[in-house]
Amino acid sequence: MAMRPITFFRAGSIDDAVAAVSANPDSAFLAGGTTEIDLLRLGVIQPTLLVDVNELPLTYLEDTEGGGVRIGAMARMSDVARAPRIVERYPGMSQALLLGASEQLRNMASMGGNMCQRTRCAYFRDGQSPCNKREPGSGCSALTGVNRGHAVLGTSDHCIATHPSDVAVALVALDATIRTIGPDGTNTIPIERFFLRPEDTPSVEHPLAHGELIVAIDVPNVPVARTSRYVKHRDRVSYEFALVSVFSAMRVDDAGNVAELRLALGGVGTVPWRAHRAEEALIGRPATPENVAAAADAEFADARTTPMNEFKVTFAKRAIVRELSEVSS
Amino acid sequence: MAINHSTAPADTGVRGPEREPVTLDVNGATYPIELEPRVSLLDALREHLDLTGTKKGCDQGTCGACTVWVDGRRVLSCLTLAMSCEGHQVSTIEGIAQDGELHPMQQAFVDHDAFQCGYCTPGQIMSAIALLREGNATTDADIAEHMSGNLCRCQAYPNIHAAIREVRDADDGG
Ligand SMILES: Cc1cc2nc3c(=O)[nH]c(=O)nc-3n(C[C@H](O)[C@H](O)[C@H](O)COP(=O)(O)OP(=O)(O)OC[C@H]3O[C@@H](n4cnc5c(N)ncnc54)[C@H](O)[C@@H]3O)c2cc1C
Ligand code: SF4
Ligand code: FES
Ligand code: FES
């Protein structure tokens, strides 16, 4: 399929990049292009100017005060996944990265771009079906359509699209922070506030202003994350998005009770889903299969399912039970 | 292998939407051509440079037939804009054989019958060579996992994996 004509600007500095996108309402940043070029060619998005940020010096990983890591927005998924400080401090994040996409895509895809990737909902991607995310007010074809892969948590009457990112699931569990530079200066956004639920405006996915560039992601020091894990359940063994994925990091105290727990889910939410309710339900209790199952029940109490995707609730609960019992043993 | 940003040209202003002069470095040769910004690296190779070894399967990043290397790293040329490759080194299947001799991976694909229709093969080979360089081919499971971005409709996977193992083990021995 032929792509619409576009203009192209290779930004030599962060300021140039921000200025170029801010000045043109029909422009977008171009990082690895694995979402941007795909959707441009499919006709799903229509920017007329692409501002290439690939040459910006944002590929670094560095330690922050207090033992965390700052990841440059243009660091590639493959490099971040294998960086020793990520593997040591946040193994579950490394696993989430390596279980995403393919090696070729991970070599291209940037961390900043990953945060902004769009849903894989087929009605969004076909460029023509009614879809509130692509064409506000046009309706949601997935509500009554093929929605086996769609979300059961955080949905609205206007959109039930699943957030596709794996690494973002790890990052919400780790309380990461998104750092940006925009037309109005610098900004820091706690990651859970970065991903917006669809509610009445599914087309608005992030609080970013037009022209606001993600420059880094800060991951704080989270000692319990040194034993974190990420498991991804999907229709094929590799190179597929999650039906259900689980990031977990747990510490059990001497009395056998859960002292610390970080739990987040992929494949089930309209945003990368931090399982706050399940965490609260388990803290201070032993992670017996019964207690874990009750905690998972609490997390999914408000799940909204369709006949095609209701299996995800059972699937996710079982995945959580299996994960947390394994981690604790 | 490190990404080499040093030769990237400085700010050249907003370009397009019409054709603009672009200099591409492919397989060690320099090609001054004219391209619209929307042209993918894949189309630039195939339609403008007549390097048709790199194949177009899906044009949406899902099949791996278009795999090439940019600065030595395997990437998908269908989701890469040619203009964004200026100042970077592109390698394609045409540049793999040296002095008329097949690359060991090409020879192993022939020896192991690692293709039927051959359409996915250039992408498979570009991925396979990169995989050994990346050093993540220790077990059969590693090979399957790290080759999962290259689909083969003819299901030649067992033979592709055999070819990769052979080159890996020969490398280890030598
Ligand atoms: C076949 C396929 C399979 C995939 N499988 C997975 C998977 O299993 N798991 C997974 O997590 N992901 C998967 N992905 C998605 C992939 O991870 C994302 O496409 C990628 O991370 C996006 O990063 P990019 O650098 O290519 O961004 P681009 O495509 O260049 O940009 C994406 C969006 O982000 C904006 N943007 C980019 N950088 C910035 C920045 N610094 N600040 C502000 N805005 C920015 C762009 O304007 C654009 O809107 C898959 C993709 C494909 C094509
Ligand atoms: S689920 Fe969301 S993205 Fe999919 S069709 Fe409905 S509105 Fe569009
Ligand atoms: S043609 Fe590029 S991945 Fe299929
Ligand atoms: S040999 Fe035919 S697609 Fe792989």
Image (cartoon, coloured by chain):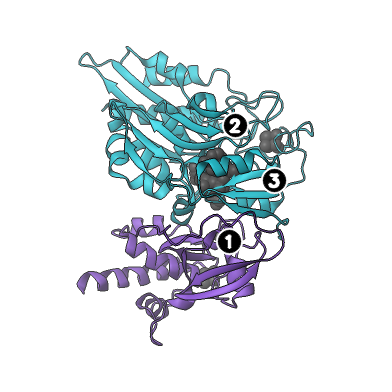
| Amino acid at dot 3 | Ile
> x, y (%) of residue A215?
47, 38
> x, y (%) of residue A128?
77, 45
Is A175 situated left or right of A182 in this image? Answer: left
Which type of secondary structure does the marked residue at label 3 adopt?
loop
Is A127 situated left or right of B162 in this image? Answer: right
> x, y (%) of residue A187?
50, 27
Which residue is identified by label 1? B83
Which residue is identified by label 2? A151
Quarter of the image containing the C terminus of chain B? bottom left
Instruction: Confirm whether circles 1 and 2 share one chain.
Output: no
Ligand 1 shown in quarter: top right
Q: Is mark 1 within 8 Å of ligand 1?
A: no
Rendered residue at 41%/18% (across/down): A279
| Amino acid at dot 1 | Met
In the image, is residue A73 above or below residue A102?
above
Q: CA distance from mark 3 to mark 2?
A: 23 Å
The picture quadrant where one finds residue A221 is top left
Chain letter of mark 2 equals A
| Circle 3 residues within 10 Å: few <14, some 14–19, many ≥20 | some
Chain letter of mark 3 equals A
Q: Is mark 3 within 8 Å of ligand 1?
A: yes
- Which chain is drawn using purple? B
Q: CA distance from mark 1 to mark 3?
A: 20 Å
Is B139 situated left or right of B50 in this image? Answer: left
